[in-house]
Amino acid sequence: MSDKNETGTDTDKADETKKDPSKQTGGDKTPETMIPKIRLDEVIQQKKELQQTLETVAADLLEDIPENFRDLVPNLPAAEKIKWLREAIKKGLFSVRQVEDGPDSKRPRGADVPKNFDGMNPQQIMAMGYKK
């Protein structure tokens, strides 16, 4: 039979927890295995600084991309965004082709370069046009 004290709690159970600390909540952790708060704060501060550095590097890589391609970059964490941007730049996703203006812009690449006709007579020039 257990006795009840004035608050209505069972005194036998309270005595058991005083004798056996493993029955208390969180009894499996001992002070020897806990990390000191100072060390934990240092690690958290280092993590924040490294995260800030990664975000800075990701922002710098994003600035190198042309303005019209920036909306193609997915919204990822900083480390994954850096990896994605480097792979995309390596594959040439953000490279802009130079548009050539002028008479040679319509000519297919690898076409013959026109020859110099200064030393030819008219029949030779016409013969050049019919050969292919």
Image: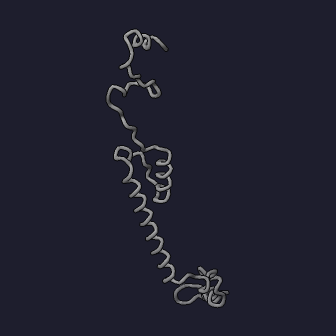
Toward the top, the furthest residue is 123
Q: Is residue 5 above or below residue 75?
A: below
Q: How is the image coloured?
A: one colour
Q: Position of residue 99 (x, y in %)?
A: 36, 34
Q: Is residue 15 above or below residue 56?
A: below
Residue ID at (48%, 52%): 86
Q: Position of residue 58 (x, y in %)?
A: 42, 58
Toward the front, the furthest residue is 119
Q: Nearer the viewer, residue 81 or 8?
A: 81
Residue ID at (49%, 14%): 132
Q: Quadrant of residue 9?
A: bottom right
Q: Nearer the viewer, residue 121 or 74?
A: 121
Q: Quadrant of residue 63?
A: bottom left
Q: Nearer the viewer, residue 54 or 11?
A: 54
Q: Is residue 117 above or below residue 42?
A: above
Q: Is residue 1 above or below residue 62?
A: below
Residue ID at (40%, 23%): 114
Tell me if 124 is positioned left or right of 29 in this view.
left
Q: Quadrant of residue 31?
A: bottom right
Tell me if 58 is positioned left or right of 17 in this view.
left
